[in-house]
Image: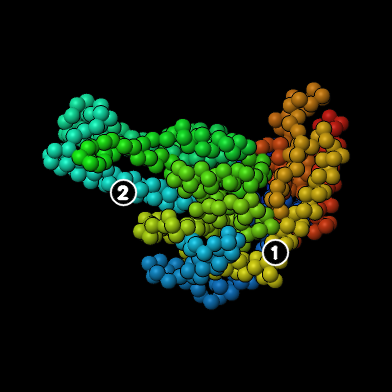
Amino acid sequence: MMNSSIGSPEFADSFMVEKLSEFGLAVRYVRAQGNTLYYLADDGTEVGVLDGVSGFGSLMFGHNNPEIVEHAKWVLDQQTPVHAQMGGYSFALNLAAELNAIVRRELGTEDKFYAQFGNTGAEAVEIAIKHAELDRVIRIAGLKGGIEANLGQARTAVAGGATLTEAAAAVAGGTDIDRLVAEVSRRNAEVEARPPLFLALEGGFHGKLVGSLQLTYNQMLRGPFKALAAQARFVPRDQPHMIAKVMEQERAALLDVVVEDGVVDVVERDFPVFTAFVVEPIMGEAGIFPLSAELAGALREACDAFGVPLISDEVQSGMGRAGTFLAGTRIGLRPDYIVLAKALGGGIAKLGVVLINERLYHKEFEFMHSSTFAKDGFSTRLALKVLQLLEADGGKAYELAAERGAKAKAMMEAIKADYPEIVREVRGEGLMLGFEFHDQSGSEFPAVREMHQAVPLLILGHMLKKHRFRIARTASGPWTMRFEPSIFLSDDEIAVVDVAFRDVCEILRSGDLSRFV
């Protein structure tokens, strides 16, 4: 039997453990159940910690949910084929059908959504942008084919006596049709050589793989790898009017010719510059910022006007966490692609999926992207169980997420009211909440100003060690603490969070950082 104890970080995570240890955050957790993680004290007894991180939103039903664990054991006991690639039939078909039923209900549409599976959220984002780029390439090919055909028709028309308009002659630098064809082809080649662009929101996070990383706003994460993939243009989340303006700034066109009444003229055809616009309905790593209904409407309007597919990244916000299956439902977001992961695997399996509207779907993509574990029997059958739990009792899980989240948010708002100089804002929907402290770089206390960059981590360590409450800050908003527990969050657990945050507020109000454990 293999040793079940956790080893040393000699060959992995050495730098992470070193940094976490500075703030008391490096812990060997040995067991997990519900909203609680356990570590062993020096005397060997278990110590429970309320887990507000919850796998960055993966644990809608808590750690090691008994029903999900029992189902996982049953799936394995059934000797379900985990690997049966190239068979065509798999349990992924059942999962895709169930996802369609839920998503079509939420969006109020009869449109079909074709499912492409991956292993993680980041891979699912990669799948979405790959398919969107395939769609762009196919549209470009159709556009080029039409132009080539029109150029051929123009040659024939001129040979039969047709003439060039002044505009066409200006492009050709004369009245020769061959020169016009050559110049149109040359100019079009320059436009076609432009690399594709993506659109995303400032502060957004969509993964750390080569492609998805370019959509992640954090410069520290993205900067070193910019040369590896297509770039994004970032739009402020609070300026809906800027969406169409940014698209217009990058607009490009191909030249085409038309023959009408014996005259050859030159016209422009919009060239698809942007592969897709990728957004999170609730921006997690930016600091838990829900998008507005106004922004959702502006996104759809601009994407339709410029022919840009809209991808909704629901990796963290979806699967009921916001109180609806899709967080975008709350603001009327109408995406062409929907990306799900994290909670889809019940906190046990690794699974991601992209749902692609039938209007854009290209069936050949099924052979262009594949992954060994993408549609494995174990993960997809677990995901079916997760959907069953979400939908049970008329969607009781969604109601719990909304109700428990509202109670936790009200508690946080009460703290903000008591400490307005310490707490800047409370944000979020359902059980995806952000508690933001004021940046302490301008504190009245010199010691706090000098240590302000370390204060968020001191807060995390203090709450873990003194209050047995584990929480994390958001990646691009270091003063925002993310709270994403399961739907089984109890009143007693909310009280633990209340005491912990109030204690931190008292310490920051006093300016005495020595009080941090």
Q: Which amino acid does label 1 sit on?
A: Ala
Q: Which residue is drawn at 45% across and 42% down?
A: 306
Q: Nearer the viewer, residue 291 or 270?
A: 270
| Place of residue 112 in the rendered image (x, y in percent of width and height, measured from the top left) | 48, 63
Question: Residue 255's image quarter?
Answer: top left
SS label for mark 2: helix
Discs 2/1, front: 2
Left or right: 94 as drawn, with respect to 24:
left
Q: Which residue is drawn at 26% across and 36% down?
A: 265
| Place of residue 224 in the rendered image (x, y in percent of width and height, measured from the top left) | 49, 33
Residue receiving disc 1: 397
Residue receiving disc 2: 142
Query: Colour scheme of this structure image?
Result: rainbow
Q: Which of 335 and 363 is in front in this view?
A: 335
Nearer-N-terminus badge (2/1): 2
Left or right: 3 as drawn, with respect to 448:
left
Q: Quadrant of the N terminus?
A: bottom right
